[in-house]
C-alpha cells in the first residue's frame, strides 16, 4: 500500500508517507511550507493527532497512523496478520473496531 498526503491544512507541513504491505519498510519525509527543516517538536505536533494504537485479539499490539478522512489506517502487516478482532484507539482516546 502506498499513501501520500499533502498539505492537509494551510499551516501543516507537507508529507509523503510510503509503506509496503507484507513488510516492515517505510519512509516518512517531511518539509516545512517555508522550505526549512522541521524541529522534532514540530514533527510531533503535526503528526501525533494521526497516530493510533492497535490492539489485536488481546495478544498483540502495535501502532499506525490515519491517512485520510475515511479513517484508513496504515500499520505494519505483522501487527494485523491473522487478526480476528482489531481495536483502534485514536489520540483523543476514542476507539473503534477495525477490519
Image (spheres, rainbow, N blue to C red):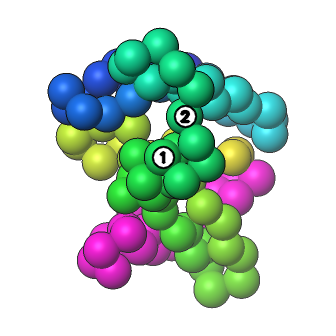
As drawn, the residue found furthest toward the bottom would be 58
Which residue appears at 60% of the width and 73% of the height? Answer: 56
Q: Quadrant of residue 92?
A: bottom left
The reply to whether residue 4 is visible in this rendering is no
Q: Is residue 89 part of the magenta span, yes or no?
A: yes
* CB under 8 Å between discs 2 and 1: yes
Residue underneath mark 2: 38
- Under circle 1, the secondary element is helix
Q: Residues within 10 Å of mark 1 (few under 14, many from 20)?
A: some
Q: Residues within 10 Å of mark 2 (few under 14, many from 20)?
A: some
Near-viewer residue (12 or 6): 12
Near-viewer residue (38 or 44): 38
The spot of residue 89 in percent (x, y) is 41, 73
Q: Which mark is residue 42?
A: 1
Total number of numbered discs in the rendering: 2
Near-viewer residue (54 or 16): 16
Give above or below for 45 relative to 57.
above
Q: Which mark is residue 28?
A: none
The spot of residue 4 in percent (x, y) is 45, 20
- Mark 2–mark 1 Cα distance, whole angstroms, equals 6 Å
Give above or below for 81 relative to 15.
below
Q: Quadrant of residue 2?
A: top right
From the image, which quarter does the N terminus lie in? top right
Range drawn in magenta? 78-99
Amino acid at each position: 500500500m502506498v499513501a501520500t498526503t499533502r498539505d492537509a491544512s494551510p499551516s501543516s507541513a507537507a508529507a509523503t508517507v510510503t509503506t509496503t504491505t507484507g513488510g516492515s519498510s517505510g519512509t516518512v519525509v517531511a518539509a516545512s511550507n517555508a522550505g526549512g527543516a522541521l524541529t522534532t517538536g514540530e514533527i510531533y505536533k503535526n503528526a501525533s493527532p494521526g497516530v493510533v494504537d492497535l490492539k489485536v485479539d488481546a495478544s498483540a499490539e502495535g501502532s499506525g497512523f490515519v491517512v485520510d478522512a475515511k479513517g484508513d489506517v496504515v500499520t505494519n502487516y505483522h501487527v494485523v496478520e491473522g487478526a480476528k478482532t482489531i481495536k483502534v484507539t485514536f489520540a483523543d482516546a476514542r476507539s473503534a473496531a477495525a477490519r
